[in-house]
Amino acid sequence: MLLLLLATASARGPASSASQRLPCRGLRGPARRDCVENATAAAERRGITSVASARGGWVCRAALVMKQGQGHHVSVNPKQRAAIDKKCGFDPRNPRFPARDADAGLVVAVHHNGFGNQLFQLAFAKLWAAASGADFAAALIDRREIPFEEQPKYKNGVVVPPRLPPHSDVGWRLFEQYFSNESLGRRDRLGTCAPLVPYENQYVGNGTRILGGRGADTKRIPLEKQLVGALAANDTCLKTLGYFQDYSLYAGLAGYLRKEIAPTPVDLVEGPGPDDVVIHIRKCRTAASGPRRPGNHKSRRHPRRTICVDAAAPPQAYTV
């Protein structure tokens, strides 16, 4: 869990560097659109490894980790991560991020599902923005950004809007409550992002791009192709829409993330200690997943240890 990552060893803060450059800076209107299209086409011919290596730094690590790990389904081991960092010239002990550049655009963390998922979404977009010299903002998922189009539903003759992914609005309200406005970024700039509808295969348009890591997104547009476009195009607005839970994305960066994701002070009955262990406990009987026996569960796609509990059953001990 990211909460465990934020509670462990720290890393030195980022240093400014002008070495990571993006194309199409300084261009506006049709000239920028043409530049983005040409840069993306050229990058697709070169391939993800070449494009990522040319960018270097954390975005190179992120792209190659996601390519090798197939999104969030397969974890990259430490040996593979070390090889990726070497190829990218990225040292997590002394990460160097470029200074903010308004022309680098805006990176938006699209928050969806529960609070734990949203922690990873925030961290991923924060790092992508920092590594690109871009502004950052966090926002709750738009109903047009759900993975699949739902059939229209009516109540008293009025169309009912599509549902957000489970727990999205609750998790977002917690973020607004427990994290400072500074941590949630330049939300005043969200108007620069054009609306896109993933289930209509809209991932790029009007200066906006969605980097979609959900299963439905990668079936429509392969993740590698999406990553190439996100690395090469320098869009006005890049929306990150996925889960981004591979530890290798964040390894060694706890100090930076702890600083950037600063919660507002809250009164806790018992605060976490430096040696506490975080365990993921969830109620596994939901309308979406159906009944599931309590106990320890590991799946082939998600090998992390999860303890499933039945809230209605008497208390019992579970072995981790």
Image (spheres, helix red, strand yellow):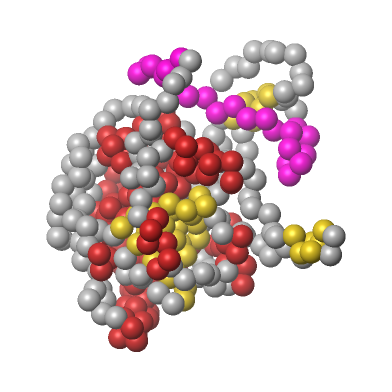
Based on the picture, tell me whether residue 274 belongs to the magenta stretch: yes
Q: Nearer the viewer, residue 161 or 41?
A: 161
State left or right for residue 303 relative to residue 158.
left
Residue for point 60% across, 17% down: 319
What is the count of numbered marks?
0
Whether residue 81 can be seen here: no
Indicate the quadrant where residue 108 lies.
bottom left
Whole-percent x, y for residue 244 in the image: 46, 48
Whole-percent x, y for residue 182 in the image: 33, 45
Based on the picture, tell me whether residue 122 belongs to the magenta stretch: no
Residue for point 75% across, 28% down: 293
Is 223 located above or below residue 263 in the figure? Answer: below
Whether residue 181 can be seen here: yes
Q: Nearer the viewer, residue 147 or 265?
A: 265
Q: Residue furthest right?
A: 156
State left or right for residue 20 relative to residue 304.
left
State which quarter of the image contains the C terminus: top right
Is 305 located above or below residue 138 in the figure? Answer: above
Whole-percent x, y for residue 317 in the image: 64, 13
User: Which contiguous range is marked in magenta?
Assistant: 270-292
Indicate the quadrant where residue 282 lies.
top right
Is 6 located above or below residue 142 in the figure? Answer: above
Q: Mostly what secondary structure, the magenta segment?
A: loop
Residue for point 73% across, 37% down: 286
Residue for point 27% across, 55% down: 131
Whole-percent x, y for residue 45 in the image: 36, 77
